[in-house]
Amino acid sequence: MATLGRLMATLLASAVGIGVMVVLATIVFFITTFVVSTGSGLAGYDPSGDFIVLSAALIVVAVILTGGFTPRMTAQYVQEPTGSSGEDPMYD
């Protein structure tokens, strides 16, 4: 029974995380749409709404994917350098 409780807690945490991610992605999408529209207006272009939405969507997808590929700040990555070079041990 304890395993089922842990499974349900993990499932609930995943659902909450997905919900938060959808809300944040939607907010970032609207902000990016405004920035792209304003920037194209300042540059002297008058693109249709389709191109503004397409470019904002591509920017948001790139930002989300970039955030997923960055290393997490865990104890594994936060270590003192062992070499004398003083560089990041992750890249040694």
Image (cartoon, grey):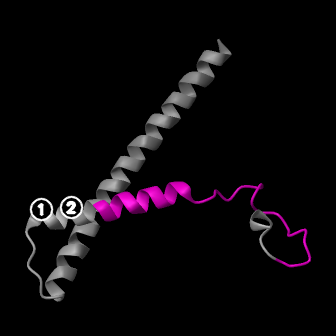
Q: Is residue 3 above or below residue 51?
A: above
Three-letter code, disc 2: Leu
Q: In the rendered structure, are the residues bearing label 2 and label 1 in contact, judged by CB atoms less than 8 Å apart?
A: yes
Q: Residue at x 58, y 60 (%)?
A: 70
What residue did someone put label 2 on? 54
Image quarter of the C terminus? bottom right
Could you say where residue 67 lies in the image, as x and y percent from the top left?
A: 50, 59
Q: Please provide percent x and percent y for residue 77.
A: 74, 60
* Disc 2 crowd, CA 10 A, few/some/many (<14, 14-19, 20+): few
Judge whether residue 78 is colored magenta: yes
Distance from label 2 to label 1 (Cα)? 6 Å
Q: Is residue 37 above or below residue 79?
A: below
| Disc 1: which residue | 50
Read off the magenta span.
58-86
Q: In the rendered view, does 2 fall on the left or right side of 66?
A: right
Q: Quadrant of residue 38?
A: bottom left
Going 67% across and 59% down the picture, which residue do you hit?
73
State which quadrant residue 91 falls in. bottom right
Which element is circle 1 on?
Answer: helix
Q: Please give left or right for residue 49 compared with residue 27 in the image.
A: left
Where is residue 25? Give x, y as percent: 35, 55
Q: Position of residue 8 (x, y in %)?
A: 54, 23
